[in-house]
Structure formats: structure tokens, C-alpha cells
Amino acid sequence: MTKVNYMNNKLIFENQEHTFEYPIQVLREDEDKNYVYVLLDIPAKQEYTFDDFHNVYAFSYNGEWKWQIGKRPIGDNDIYTLINVKEGTLYATDFSGRKYKVCEENGIPEKMEIVK
């Protein structure tokens, strides 16, 4: 298995690295699906961009960019604060406590439940 590390805003694979605008807050791996998920730490500011609200990314273990999390069906203007992989499924929770099941193929949030 390829070794993956991160330092501040750099995601480091064996043969390449990706640099983000903001620091990496959490890195989760799903070895069964050959995916690495990244949550960026978005600082508080007055105006946020689409990328700020969609701060979850997926890569393959060889460093290939797969997707940036897609638009939510409800409340698309909240920053994600937590990601977890449970039984092969990625879950992303936003600041308002909405936990989304994320499609690993395209990054689209599918099912939502309130966790706060």
C-alpha cells in the first residue's frame, strides 16, 4: 500500500504531492476502496467561496485527484467540520450538525441526518 502523509496544506504521496489553499484538518483512508479523503481546515472569515463550503476531497492511493465534494440538496452554505469512514462509507458532517453519506464515485452528498 502506498504511504500517504500530510504536512500543513500539502498532501504527500510517494511520487507526487498536492498543495491546498488551507491546511489539512483530517485525513482518512479507505484501503478497501483505494481512496484517501481530505478535510481542509477553513478559517473564519467574512465571505466564503464555493471551495470553502466544499472542503472535502478524494484521491486514489497513487495520488490521482478523484473529486471535490458536491453540492448538498439542503443548506449548501456550511463548512464541513468532520469526516469519517465507517464500514466502507464516507460520512461528512457540516457546521450545522448535518451528517451526509457521500457517494465515493462522484462525491455527491446523498443521505442526511442531524447529529447535533
Image (cartoon, rainbow, N blue to C red):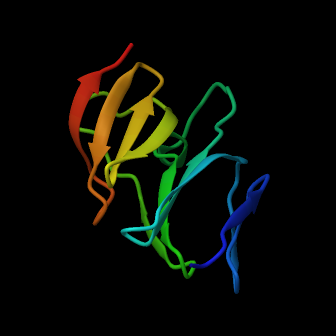
Choose between 32 and 73: the one closer to the eye.
Answer: 32
Q: In which quarter of the view is residue 100 placed?
A: top left
Looking at the image, the residue that sits furthest to the top is 116
Would you place residue 102 above or below residue 106 in this image?
above
Would you place residue 78 above or below residue 70 in this image?
above
Looking at the image, the residue that sits furthest to the right is 7
User: What residue is drawn where x is 36% and y is 69%?
Assistant: 33
Which quarter of the image is occupied by the N terminus? bottom right
Choose between 78 and 113: the one closer to the eye.
Answer: 113
Q: How many numbered marks have been drawn onto this rendered protein structure?
A: 0
Residue 26, position in %: x, y? 61, 45
Residue 99, position in %: x, y? 34, 30
115 relative to 49 in the view: left or right:
left
25 relative to 32 in the view: left or right:
right
User: What residue is drawn where x is 28% and y is 42%?
Assistant: 101
Looking at the image, the residue that sits furthest to the bottom is 15
User: What residue is drawn where x is 79% and y is 52%?
Assistant: 8
Choose between 1 and 52: the one closer to the eye.
Answer: 1
25 relative to 92 in the view: left or right:
right
Residue 15, position in %: x, y? 70, 86
Residue 88, position in %: x, y? 32, 55
Would you place residue 112 above or below residue 24 in this image?
above
